[in-house]
Image: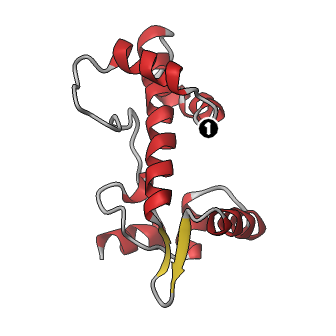
Amino acid sequence: MFELAESSPACATSRDALLNARSWSRRELRRALRRAMRDGLVHERPGAGIALTRAGQVEAQRVVRNHRLWELFLITHADIAASHVDRDADAIEHVLKPEMARELEQLLLKEQPGVLVPASPHAITPSGSLAKELRA
């Protein structure tokens, strides 16, 4: 949700739009949303859809930041093409320790001081109904 709506984090989206953006089944999405609601990371707005809570925005920003730091490391220091780093970053983003994230920041973000979440090295393009919702 965060990556697809970075420019407007308070944006709510439908379950169908989330399914279009991810490779999850309806059952997997239901489970993920139930867990996120239980943890206070998302809430459902009647008639508007699912939205990140403030705590959800903070956690999503942390995970996306870790994901992108790892992608940048793989691209710049492991010489892996940008088109091949996403899955590796998916595997590490939730477990990257704060100390390692700080080391990656120092190593990679000297040219971008003050940037909290680096830009994605690959295009993030919502499709279908999610793209329509984000334009609305």
Query: Can residue 1 be seen in this snapshot?
Result: no
- Could you tell whether 28 is left or right of 89 in the image? right
Q: Position of residue 41 (x, y in %)?
A: 55, 62
Residue carrying label 1: 94
Q: Please report the residue visible at 47 percent of the width from the left and 73 percent of the height from the top.
A: 13
23 and 96: which one is in front? 96
Q: Position of residue 25 (x, y in %)?
A: 74, 64
- Which residue occupies the extreme bottom position in the image? 47
Q: Position of residue 115 (x, y in %)?
A: 27, 34
- Could you tell whether 5 is left or right of 115 in the image? right
Quarter-wise, where is residue 105 in the image? top left
Q: Quadrant of the C terminus?
A: bottom left
13 and 114: which one is in front? 114
Q: Residues within 10 Å of mark 1 (few under 14, many from 20)?
A: some
Q: Position of residue 78 (x, y in %)?
A: 51, 10
**Secondary structure category for the residue under label 1:** loop
Q: Please report the residue visible at 48 percent of the width from the left and 58 percent of the height from the top.
A: 55
